[in-house]
Image (tube, rainbow, N blue to C red):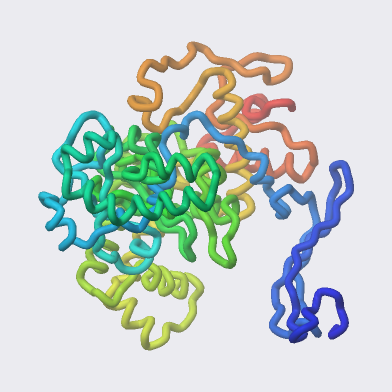
């Protein structure tokens, strides 16, 4: 189609266009997705799916209908956004500026502390190899406090950051540019919300916002995270295990979207609505903790021992193993040095244990997992509307919270205590059958019809 309007007139290259055609109302649609465009523009191959198409252009479970849960609030945020490269210094510069070693915690702005220079990590540092740089953080200090308390640091920022901020303010008349110029010794985005949450933990979970592989890991409090990291103020390895599981990663991959061809992890789409398992027996929690701790420690150890390894390389080989692909000579070397089979064993164990925590079979199909997570999100939202909130860190999120006694939901003709996993009754028969099957498969004992019915709203 050389004369097609989608073809560039200069060189004839095909231009990819995302196009949707819709009609008002609820009805099934036909979704075509490009599977092969190597022969474009003469030939483009599509896959086809028929069914209800949600606003995020996918059939099946409507992830776009999931809502943020109070249980997860106040715990996740992107890292700081510098708005000035002059904040970044080498270890040698840090020593010249008077840094006295690695600080023990991220500053919360509550009074003066000895150190204002931290180890610094961005997305590339975690996915590849750390650059070994540090960052100056004067959060919580006025200009006078910064000048009088840290004169060498103040002078460095005066020369390295202030001219850039002033120049940007002169070119841009936005309120942000003006604020950055007025508070030139501070980061553009200081993220007070995550600092407050981090004040109560000994370490935190981080993941690269845009990355080929969705990997979660612990970072020490001595590291200040960059804007391209999404951080969770959770130091329990149980939560690391849940987030690292197939169930969580599948949700993140489908809910987060992509940037170019790389999946994105959005706090608002991936973390806030994600329903963690609840009422998990302590012995099972301990098993998840142990596997997550072992996985995190193993990855850190092999990366520390081999300078030519990266997290991306390890997970490239892990994906090849899962797909059953024959490893190249280079991949085999990464596998052997990186102990990738052991990494896989930990992931497999975490997947099985977390599925058990949900009360689900470990081999559920992807779409079935997503359907259940969407239903569970709606059930949790219904609970929270009645005041039943399953906080992830109640001592921080809601220290004065008391669960309502005998909380109830309207289940039709009867009023009964809120089941843990109450699900809205689907409209279509195939979905109804699937939903009932999900309840039955998640129970370890036979259920009477009324017991099944109590798990649904609007039956």
Q: Estimate the x, y position of residue 339 in percent, counting from the top left.
A: 29, 71
- Does 387 sit left or right of 219 as displayed? right
| Residue 114, placed above or below residue 338 | above
Q: In which quarter of the view is residue 105 placed?
A: top left
Is the C terminus in the top left, top right, bottom left or bottom right quadrant? top right
Of the 4 image quadrants, the one containing the N terminus is bottom right
- Whether residue 379 is situated above or below residue 361 in the rendered picture: above
Residue at left 25%, top 59%? 89
Q: State the image coordinates of residue 56 (x, y, percent, origin top left).
A: 69, 51
Image quarter for residue 208? Answer: bottom left
Vertical placement of residue 164 versus 382, above or below: below
The quadrant in which residue 396 appears is: top left
Q: Residue at x 31, y 57 (%)?
A: 295
Answer left or right for 101 relative to 142: left
In this figure, what is the number of numbered marks? 0
Can residue 244 be seen by looking at this rendering?
A: no
- Mark yes or no: residue 69 visible: yes
In x, y percent, where is residue 355?
Answer: 47, 47
Q: Residue furthest top?
A: 405
User: What residue is at 84 percent from the left and 42 percent from the top?
Assistant: 26
Q: Position of residue 130 (x, y in %)?
A: 29, 65
Looking at the picture, tell me which residue is in the foreground, 377 or 146.
146
Q: Residue furthest front?
A: 170
Q: Is 410 in front, or is 309? A: 309
Please state which of residues 205 and 299 is positioned toward the viewer in this rendering.
Answer: 205
Residue plotted at (14% across, 40% down): 114
Quick check: 434 left or right of 328?
Answer: right
């Amino acid at each position: 189609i050389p004369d097609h309007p989608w073809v560039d007139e200069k060189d004839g290259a095909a231009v990819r266009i995302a196009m949707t055609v819709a009609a008002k109302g609820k009805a099934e649609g036909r979704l075509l997705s490009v599977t092969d465009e190597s022969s474009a523009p003469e030939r483009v191959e599509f896959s086809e799916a028929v069914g209800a198409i949600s606003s995020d252009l996918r059939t099946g479970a409507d992830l776009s209908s999931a809502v943020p849960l109070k249980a997860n609030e106040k715990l996740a945020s992107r890292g700081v956004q510098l708005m000035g490269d002059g904040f970044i210094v080498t270890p040698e510069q840090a020593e010249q500026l008077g840094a006295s070693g690695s600080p023990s915690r991220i500053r919360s702005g509550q009074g003066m502390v000895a150190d204002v220079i931290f180890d610094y990590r961005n997305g590339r540092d975690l996915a590849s190899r750390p650059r070994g740089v540090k960052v100056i953080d004067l959060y919580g200090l006025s200009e006078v406090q910064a000048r009088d308390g840290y004169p060498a640091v103040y002078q460095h920022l005066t020369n390295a950051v202030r001219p850039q901020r002033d120049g940007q303010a002169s070119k841009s008349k936005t309120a942000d540019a003006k604020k950055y110029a007025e508070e030139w010794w501070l980061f553009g985005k200081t993220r007070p919300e995550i600092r407050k949450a981090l004040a109560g933990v000994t370490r935190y979970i981080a993941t690269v916002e845009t990355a080929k592989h969705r990997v979660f890991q612990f970072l020490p409090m001595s590291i200040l995270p960059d804007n391209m990291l999404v951080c969770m103020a959770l130091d329990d390895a149980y939560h690391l295990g849940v987030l690292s599981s197939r169930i969580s990663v599948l949700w993140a991959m489908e809910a987060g979207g992509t940037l170019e061809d790389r999946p994105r992890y959005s706090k608002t789409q991936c973390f806030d609505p994600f329903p963690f398992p609840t009422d998990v027996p302590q012995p099972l929690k301990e098993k998840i903790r142990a596997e997550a701790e072992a996985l995190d420690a193993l990855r850190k150890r092999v990366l520390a021992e081999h300078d030519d390894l990266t997290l991306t390389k390890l997970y490239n080989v892990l994906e090849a193993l899962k797909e059953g692909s024959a490893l190249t000579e280079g991949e085999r070397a990464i596998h052997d040095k990186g102990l990738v089979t052991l990494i896989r064993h930990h992931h497999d164990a975490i997947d099985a244990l977390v599925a058990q925590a949900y009360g689900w079979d470990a081999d559920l199909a992807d779409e079935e997992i997503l359907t259940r997570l969407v239903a569970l999100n709606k059930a949790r939202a219904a609970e929270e509307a009645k005041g039943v909130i399953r906080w992830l860190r109640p001592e921080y999120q809601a220290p004065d919270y008391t669960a309502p006694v005998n909380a109830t939901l309207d289940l039709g003709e009867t009023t009964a205590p809120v089941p843990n996993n109450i699900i809205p009754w689907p409209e279509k028969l195939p979905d109804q059958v699937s939903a009932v099957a999900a309840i039955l498969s998640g129970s370890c004992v036979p259920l009477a019809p009324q017991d099944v019915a109590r798990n649904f709203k609007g039956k």
